[in-house]
Structures are given as C-alpha cells and as structure tokens.
C-alpha cells in the first residue's frame, strides 16, 4: 500500500487501522485498569501540567481509544462529566465496554478532531494521549480545541513522539527484531503470525501509514500559541524506560502471546517501571525535551 496522499486519505487509513486493532489494543499495549495504570495516567498529566492536577467538571478526550486516560481520570475523581471521542467506531465500542466493566458513565462520539460536534465553551479540559501525531491538520484541530474550551480551560496532551526521540527509539526496535528468533527459542515460544496484535496481516500493513507527525517541542508550542493558547508548556519524558520498553515490546510482538512466560512479563513490567523512576529523578528536567521519546503539552485558554 502506498502512503496516503491527502488529509482525507490519512483520516480514512487511521479509521480503518484503529477499527481493526481495537479488539486487541488493550492487550497489545499492556493497558492496566488498576492502581498501576492509574498512577501512570496521573503521573503523565501531572508532568504535563507541572504540578498537582485540579478537578475538572467537564472533560473532552480527543482520540480516546479504549478509554485509558478518561476512565482513569474519572476513577481518580478528577473528572466529573467525561466525553470521549475517536475517529474509530471500533475503539469507541471497546471504550464503552471498558466503562461498563468499570461501572463508569461516559458520553462518546465518533468524530474527527478537526471538526468537533460540540458547542463553544462546552469543556474545562481537552486532553489526549498519543493522538496529535495522527491528525493531518493540526492548526484546524487546535482551533477546535480552543473553541470548545470554556475561558480559563486547559489542554493537556501526552505521549507525542519527539522527532529525535523517535529516531533513537528505532535502535532498540531494530536490535530486538534481529535477536527475536533466538529470544523465542530461549523462552520456548513459537513465532506469531504477522500482524496478530493488529487485527491481521492486512490491517497491520496500515500501521506504518497512520503516524503523520513527529514533533520538535517548538512545533507543539507554535501550534498552541498560534491557536490562541497561553501559558504553553512542552516537556519530555522517558528515555531509558522507552529504550527498555520498545526492546521488550518488539520481542513480544513476534511471539505467540500465551507462550510468553509470566516470569518474563514480570521482568519486563517491573524493569520498565524502575527505569521510569530513573528517568524522572535523574534525566527529565535536566536533558533537552528533544532527546526524550515522548513530548507533553499543556496550555490554557485565556480568560
């Protein structure tokens, strides 16, 4: 498949890919609905804001996927009325099932971030995780974020790939792919079919076309500032944890999931959490945001 050549084609590929990947998305990314997952979500939002998280009466999540951020924010009592949007109807279906499982009440809408079906000033928080890099027209999307926010409301976005951090992350991915056969032999796991975690090989082929941006911090600062936001703040997170995480994730994606030993999973999970703490205490805030894999953005609508 050739790369999408227009904004409409990019949107269509993102919708198709995420529809196909929705059923296995939580498993693929190790999404946790307990205390560990909540700490991850709240930690990212705190970093983006630069301090304690205030309570928001009305929130709108852009590209909510299966609900990881909104549902954890709601369970933590930091969001009153939660509205979740995604371009993928398949993702919204899984999100609604997760909300039912967790006994949470959320409103949902299948829509495009560049054309939100909400009244002006409807929300106190507009946020998202790993979504901006999928959106073709960022200027149009940021204008919509500003429009639907009440005066004084905030935007918070986490998990956006930095341009240099993304390049650095290719190193562990390539290395892991090279040693994957030996790793599978060592743990006694069979090779998994191509694209098994993305809804099949055909859908997996779409994955390389859904990411349309990798950012410099200045890119996000400009997008927010040009839209009219103030108090714009862009920071970076995860360097060592990202290398470790991508190495293990790349290995695991090559193996039949049920045949990966629990001991390996515990090592990968605990090691990732430990290196997150190293990044947070020693590297984040000391190194330039550009070297980290993830960028975080927060800003405020004047008023």
Image (cartoon, rainbow, N blue to C red):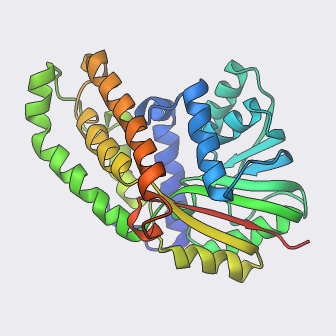
Q: Is residue 152 above or below residue 175?
A: below
Tell me which residue sits at (38%, 42%) in the image. 275
Judge left or right: residue 93 versus residue 279.
right
Q: Is residue 152 above or below residue 111?
A: below
- Residue 119 sits in quarter: bottom right
- Where does the C terminus fall, quadrant-wise? bottom right
Is residue 245 among the parts visible in the rendering? yes
Decide which of 67, 51 is in the foreground and name it.
51
Is residue 199 among the parts visible in the rendering? no
Decide which of 182, 53 is in the foreground and name it.
53
Residue 286, horizontal then vertical, whole percent: 45, 65
Tell me which residue sits at (43%, 70%) in the image. 290
Residue 194, horizontal then vertical, whole percent: 25, 38
- Number of residue marks: 0
Decide which of 94, 164 is in the foreground and name it.
164
Residue 118, horizontal then vertical, whole percent: 85, 57
Residue 246, horizontal then vertical, whole percent: 31, 45
Judge left or right: residue 36 versus residue 77.
left
- Where does the N terminus fall, quadrant-wise? bottom left
Tell me which residue sits at (60%, 25%) in the image. 35
- Residue 163 sits in quarter: bottom left
Decide which of 202, 37 is in the foreground and name it.
37
Q: Is residue 3 above or below residue 277?
A: below
Judge left or right: residue 264 versus residue 31.
left
Tell me which residue sits at (14%, 18%) in the image. 188
């Amino acid at each position: 498949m050739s790369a999408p050549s227009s904004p409409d084609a990019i949107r269509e590929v993102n919708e198709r890919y995420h529809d196909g990947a929705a059923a296995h998305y939580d498993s693929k990314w190790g999404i946790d609905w307990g205390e560990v997952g909540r700490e991850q979500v709240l930690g990212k939002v705190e970093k983006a804001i630069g301090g304690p998280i205030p309570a928001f009466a009305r929130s709108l999540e852009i590209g909510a996927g299966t609900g990881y951020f909104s549902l954890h924010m709601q369970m933590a009592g930091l969001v009153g009325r939660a509205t979740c949007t995604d371009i993928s109807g398949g993702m919204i279906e899984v999100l609604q099932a997760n909300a039912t499982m967790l006994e949470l009440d959320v409103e949902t809408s299948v829509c495009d971030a560049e054309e939100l079906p909400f009244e002006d000033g409807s929300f106190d928080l507009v946020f998202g995780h790993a979504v901006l890099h999928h959106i073709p027209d960022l200027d149009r999307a940021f204008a919509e974020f500003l429009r639907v926010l009440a005066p004084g409301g905030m935007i918070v976005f986490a998990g956006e790939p930095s341009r240099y951090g993304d390049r650095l992350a290719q190193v562990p991915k390539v290395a892991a792919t090279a040693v994957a056969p030996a790793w599978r032999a060592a743990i006694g796991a069979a090779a998994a079919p191509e694209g098994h975690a993305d809804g099949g090989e055909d859908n997996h082929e779409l994955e390389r076309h859904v990411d349309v941006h990798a950012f410099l911090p200045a890119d996000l600062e400009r997008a927010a500032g040009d839209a009219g936001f103030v108090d714009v703040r862009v920071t970076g997170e995860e360097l060592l944890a990202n290398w470790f995480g991508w190495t293990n994730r790349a290995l695991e994606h090559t193996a039949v999931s049920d045949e990966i030993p629990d001991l390996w999973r515990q090592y990968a999970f605990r090691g990732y959490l430990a290196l997150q703490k190293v990044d947070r205490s020693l590297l984040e805030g000391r190194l330039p945001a550009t070297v980290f894999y993830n960028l975080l953005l927060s800003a405020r609508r004047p008023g």
